[in-house]
Amino acid sequence: MRDLGLSNKRVVVTGAAGGLGRAFARAFADAGAKVLAADLDGRGASETARLIIERGGAAQGAEADVTIAESCRALVQAAEAFMGGLDILVNNAAVFAGLERRPFAEIDEAVWDKVMAVNVKGVWQMTRAAAPALRAAGGGAIVNVSSATVFSGSPQWMHYVASKGAVIAMTRSMARELGDDRIRVNVLAPGFTLTEASLAMMENARSYGVERGALKRAAEVEDIVGGALYLASPLADYVTGQTLIVDGGRQFI
């Protein structure tokens, strides 16, 4: 892999038990970074770490609930204990798997609250917990994972669309507030990607939306990780407050 300037960087990836989170964790490790893979599913996070270690990387798994402030602080403390500090945070944890499409007036209130708690509050909580460690490192990078669905306004998906739109809005505010600390904050907005969750969600996952893209194929997780590596790397040292859509040309803004 090309040297991206990520060697020995200290990275926390949330939602790393599978799917894109596991792919992000493995990609950063392959680029030479040390990775703390975190997830509410602690066993899954530890499995991600094991897979990285098998490939010769440096990683550790951790159980964390991004909706709880103390859990977020404990995760940052675990990163400091394992890696000696923190340079990069990837806010990937989100509620997606198992969500049912339904008209906005029929969305269950408890489901709405859960989506917002993880997808929105979780990003705020983790960033708030990580900011002191990033400042102590002399600056760093935060990659908040949103979704290209924000730009298409997918119908019967309002709770998810709204939560991912909030991630973009928060990122812009975070970038303003953290810029003086040399902390860059950007958004990665993947399009529909073939993960375990999306494959389980619909029978036609491999053909879903393919005809709308400039590149007429479905996205694999390997297609998405490069965007996160770029935004976190020195190659993007003058990039902050931005949204990078990686969807094969399904959305142009």
Image (cartoon, rainbow, N blue to C red):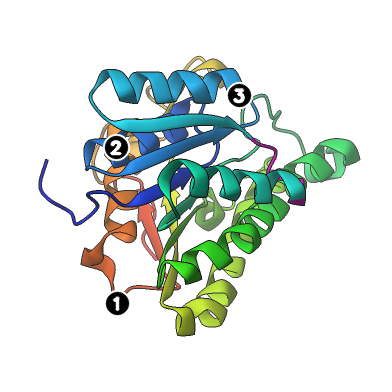
Q: Which residues are magenta?
A: 64-69
What is the C-alpha distance between the residues marked 1 and 3? 35 Å
Where is 173 relative to 16, above or below? below
Q: Earlier in the sequence, mark 1 or mark 3?
A: 3
Residue 4 spot, x, y in % from top left: 18, 54
Q: Is residue 84 magenta?
A: no
| Left/right of residue 170 with respect to residue 133 in the rendered view | right
Q: Give whichever of 218, 238 is nearer the camera.
A: 238
- Dot 1: within a 10 Å radius of its alpha carbon, few (fewer than 14), some, or many (20 or more) residues? few
Residue 201 spot, x, y in % from top left: 57, 21
| Left/right of residue 200 with respect to residue 206 in the rendered view | right
Q: Is residue 67 magenta?
A: yes
Of circles 1 and 3, the one toward us is 3
> Does the rendering let one see residue 111?
yes
Q: Earlier in the sequence, mark 1 or mark 2?
A: 2
Q: Residue at x 45, y 55 (%)?
A: 85
Residue named by callout 1: 238
Q: Secondary structure at mark 3?
A: helix
Q: Residue at x 27, y 56 (%)?
A: 230
Q: Secondary structure at mark 1?
A: loop
Q: Give whichever of 194, 41 is nearer the camera.
A: 41
Residue named by callout 2: 29
Quarter that holds the C terminus: bottom left
Q: What amino acid type should be assigned to the residue bearing mark 1?
A: Tyr
Question: Do tag 1 and tag 2 residues touch (Cβ < 8 Å)?
Answer: no
Q: What amino acid type should be assigned to the residue bearing mark 3?
A: Gly
Residue 42's label in the rendered image is: 3
Q: Residue at x 47, y 45 (%)?
A: 12
Q: Earlier in the sequence, mark 2 or mark 3?
A: 2
Q: What amino acid type should be assigned to the residue bearing mark 2?
A: Ala
Where is 31 relative to 53, above or below? below
